[in-house]
Amino acid sequence: MNINSNLADPNQIPYGTPFPLESAHTSQKWSKKDWLVKVYIPIIVPIIAALIGGGYFLLKPSSSSIPFLYRSYSGTYTDTTLGKSGRLTMSDVSENTSTGTFTASGTIETPGGTCFIQNTNGLITAEGKMTWVVTYEQSTACNAGAANVTGQLTDGVITGTWTNADPSIQDTGTFTLS
């Protein structure tokens, strides 16, 4: 005898009642919102969370960032107009790596002594191309004047050329700084 005879048999489904695992709306297609809520978001959100957790979206230096200049450089120059060469330094380099602008002081060793110089209006691009103006301080070793300089920074070495800023004075040269 069944002591629970007035309870419904859980193995029998009443007529007209859909099967419990079957949706009442099986004949309708999903809307775009259904796809978004039921499929895309549950798949994409965990993937993005995993990428964020793994550090994929951390800020990384761009390949187009401005190269860092050393605080000082030393090397040699050759005055191709006069056929003379000597030591050259660039020191106290101050750079803005956001804009690529820089300034520096320096020295040029000449047969007559040491010339002190100021490097101004410096600009370096992400590719390492450089331009600046060298101003010579008046001394017994140097006449006051200026030169326009172009250079290229590659692996910490600056190579380049200069031309006197006064077109009436023919003076050009090359240099290497590291």
Image (spheres, rainbow, N blue to C red):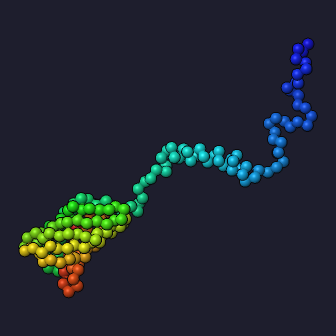
**Picture residue at 23% right of the left edge, 85% below the top:** 167
**Picture residue at 82% right of the left edge, 35% below the top:** 20
Q: Is residue 160 visible?
A: no
Where does the image place residue 130, in percent across and percent down from the top left? 30, 69
Where does the image place residue 104, in percent across and percent down from the top left? 23, 65
Q: Is residue 145 left or right of residue 96?
A: left
On-image quarter of the C terminus = bottom left
The answer to which of 121 and 151 lies nearer the viewer is 121
User: Of all residues shown, which one is farthest toward the top?
Assistant: 1
Location of residue 103 with respect to 171 vertically, above or below: above
Q: Is residue 29 left or right of residue 155?
A: right
Would you identify the image quadrant in which residue 155 lies? bottom left
Would you identify the image quadrant in which residue 87 lies? bottom left
Where does the image place residue 174, in percent across and percent down from the top left? 22, 73
Q: Is residue 153 left or right of residue 14?
A: left
**Picture residue at 65% right of the left edge, 45% below the top:** 42
Location of residue 84 with respect to 13 vertically, above or below: below
Q: How many marks?
A: 0
Where does the image place residue 177, in percent across and percent down from the top left? 22, 65
Would you identify the image quadrant in which residue 6 lies? top right
On-image quarter of the N terminus = top right
Location of residue 96 with respect to 8 vertically, above or below: below
**Picture residue at 25% right of the left edge, 76% below the top:** 148
Q: Is residue 57 visible?
A: yes
